[in-house]
Image (cartoon, coloured by chain):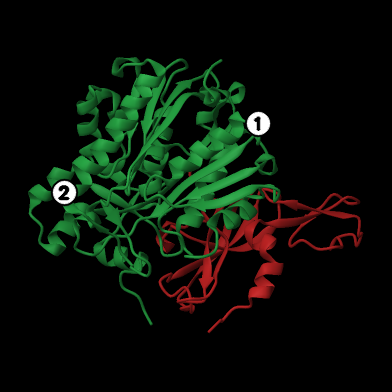
């Protein structure tokens, strides 16, 4: 008997990247950072949401595209989970707003999830379990964030906005079937935001070795051990992308060559979209992958945890790619703004 | 202090989240908004359908009026959009500057914040329009 998650797959996917971009050199010049800091992060620019956008509106757009690619009616979806660390309301679910706005069945499991940048991935895991067990036929998982950063903090170079959504359903209808999914979590204080705090704080260098690298390496090694796979068995590898360098570094530590990571690397051009980070990368890979190829996906969330997933692309993928905006189209649609416009859009300055 | 009516928004939320049209089963014509009688033939044998949310800009104007609860969004582009279903509706165009807007431009509906009772009140979501990305 195979693994239960093999009964589920990605039936549809969708992404959203706001139109506006801020060059990170402008942030560095404003706050007086050395050029080598920007270079060390491997960053060029980041996506900035408009003043009337938030994690609900971006999640809605990504979900709409995911449902279009799934080729199903919204009312066929029986579970909606939204992962975000920038909820518009501290108390009031985003998932009910998005679900009703899309016309999803009201007889649905619905909740918001929080696990730093990993909650959207947890939303996928929960839906995979629900589909595998036969509890639901289709479930919607959304990762969406307008990431906050303390002005002048190094986090401001990367914290950006974006969303990704996945419709999970039966493997026989999928563009990519799950081969295995594992999770590795520990209590690690690398990044947090206290109640009523506008911006998150982080443990500087502590976010690297004991957090990002330890958890992703652990989850990926666990996945390969359970599935009997080795790094060379994967055609693509997508990791959480807090900056442009960490995904390449963790790949090297795992023995995965750079050319398998670059197709899904988006952070240098849009920034760290937190809960959408690895999931936009996965979407970009799905839009280029061929049937039979194997994809490794390993999102990470501070606090801390990492999921590792292995997916096999099916021949259904090609018919779905151009049904909705692709990641490449969203990446190329951009208008540059200055720091003042960014500050106004993200309410770093605001009127009373 | 709340500036908007929560109860009115809640009752009408399906009209804010989707573009509801009236399709007459007798004469076949489609009208906006959703109502119980066809404005063309007077028949009350009608059904309510959702618009695809796609259309073209017929004409537009630029507003410099600053709205409370949405002060950052100025100037505001307000257009008449002819939907693919043939009806014309007023709509706000976002993610575009006035210089970029052209008559005949293809647009699609997107969910955005319409207004909010800041800093602690409700956020009101609804549809605006943006240039089509995936034609």
Residue B96 position, x and y percent, is 43, 58
Frontmost residue, A106 versus A116: A116
Please indicate whether residue A229 sits to the left or right of residue B129 in the image.
left
Judging by colour alone, the chain drawn in red in this rendered image is B
Q: Is residue B19 above or below residue A261?
A: below
Q: Which residue is mark 1?
A: A134
Q: Decide which of A230, A294 is in the foreground and name it.
A: A230
Q: Secondary structure at mark 2?
A: helix
Which residue: 45% across, 59% down?
A: A87
Q: Who is closer to the viewer here, A125 or A198?
A: A125
Q: Is residue A350 above or below residue A280?
A: below
Query: Mark 2 Cα within 10 Å, few/some/many (few <14, many 20+)?
Result: few
Residue A205 numbered tag: 2
The relative height of residue A70 versus residue A142 in the rendered view (above or below) is above
The spot of residue B20 in percent (x, y) is: 72, 57
Q: Secondary structure at mark 1?
A: loop
Taking the image as shown, residue A229 lies to the left or right of residue A242, namely right
Q: Chain of mark 2?
A: A
Q: Is residue A74 visible?
A: yes
Image point (31%, 46%), residue name: A270
Residue visible at 42% across and 56% down in the picture? B100
Q: Residue A323: tell me if it is visible.
A: no
Q: Colour of chain A?
A: green
Disc 1 crowd rating (10 Å Cα; few below 14, some 14-19, many 20+) is some
Between the residue at mark 2 and the residue at mark 1, the CA separation in whole angstroms equals 43 Å
Instruction: Tell me which numbered mark, 2 or 1, is placed earlier along the sequence.
Output: 1
């Amino acid at each position: 008997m195979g693994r239960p998650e093999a009964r589920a797959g990605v039936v549809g996917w969708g992404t959203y990247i706001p139109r506006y971009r801020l060059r990170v050199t402008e942030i560095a010049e404003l706050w007086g950072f050395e050029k080598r800091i920007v270079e060390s992060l491997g960053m060029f620019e980041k996506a900035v949401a408009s003043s009337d956008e938030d994690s609900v509106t971006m999640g809605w757009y990504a979900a709409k595209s995911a449902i279009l690619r799934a080729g199903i009616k919204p009312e066929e979806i029986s579970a909606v989970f939204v992962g975000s660390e920038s909820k518009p309301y501290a108390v009031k679910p985003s998932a009910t707003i998005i679900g009703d706005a899309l016309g999803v069945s009201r007889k649905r499991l619905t909740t918001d999830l929080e696990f730093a940048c990993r909650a959207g991935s947890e939303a996928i895991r929960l839906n995979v379990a629900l589909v595998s067990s036969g509890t639901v036929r289709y479930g919607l998982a959304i990762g969406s964030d307008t990431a906050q950063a303390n002005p002048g903090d190094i986090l401001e170079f990367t914290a950006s906005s974006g969303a990704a959504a996945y419709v999970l359903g039966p493997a026989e209808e999928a563009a990519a079937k799950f081969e295995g999914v594992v999770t590795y979590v520990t209590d690690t204080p690398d990044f947090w935001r206290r109640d009523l705090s506008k911006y998150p704080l982080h443990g500087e260098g502590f976010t690297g070795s004991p957090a990002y690298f330890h958890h992703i390496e652990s989850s990926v090694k666990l996945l390969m051990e359970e599935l009997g796979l080795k790094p060379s068995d994967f055609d693509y590898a997508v990791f959480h992308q807090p900056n442009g360098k960490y995904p390449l570094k963790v790949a090297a530590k795992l023995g995965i060559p750079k050319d398998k990571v670059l197709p899904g690397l988006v952070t240098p051009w849009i920034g760290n979209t937190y809960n959408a980070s690895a999931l936009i990368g996965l979407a970009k890979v799905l839009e280029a992958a061929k049937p039979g190829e194997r994809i490794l996906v390993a999102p990470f969330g501070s606090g801390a945890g990492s999921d590792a997933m292995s997916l096999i692309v099916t021949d259904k993928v090609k018919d779905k790619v151009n049904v909705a905006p692709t990641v490449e189209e969203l990446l190329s649609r951009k208008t540059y703004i200055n720091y003042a416009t960014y500050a106004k859009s993200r309410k770093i300055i605001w009127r009373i | 202090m709340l500036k908007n009516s929560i109860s009115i928004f809640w009752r009408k939320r399906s009209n804010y989240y989707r573009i509801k049209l009236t399709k007459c089963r007798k004469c076949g014509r489609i009208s906006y908004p959703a109502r119980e009688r066809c404005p063309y033939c007077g028949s009350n044998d009608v059904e309510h359908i959702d618009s695809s949310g796609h259309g073209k800009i017929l004409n537009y104007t630029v507003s410099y009026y600053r709205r409370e609860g949405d002060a950052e969004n100025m100037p505001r582009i307000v257009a008449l959009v002819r939907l693919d279903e043939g009806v014309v509706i007023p709509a706000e165009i976002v993610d575009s500057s006035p210089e970029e807007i052209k008559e005949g431009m293809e647009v699609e509906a997107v969910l955005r914040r319409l207004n909010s009772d800041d800093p602690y009140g409700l956020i009101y979501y609804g549809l605006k329009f943006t240039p089509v990305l995936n034609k």
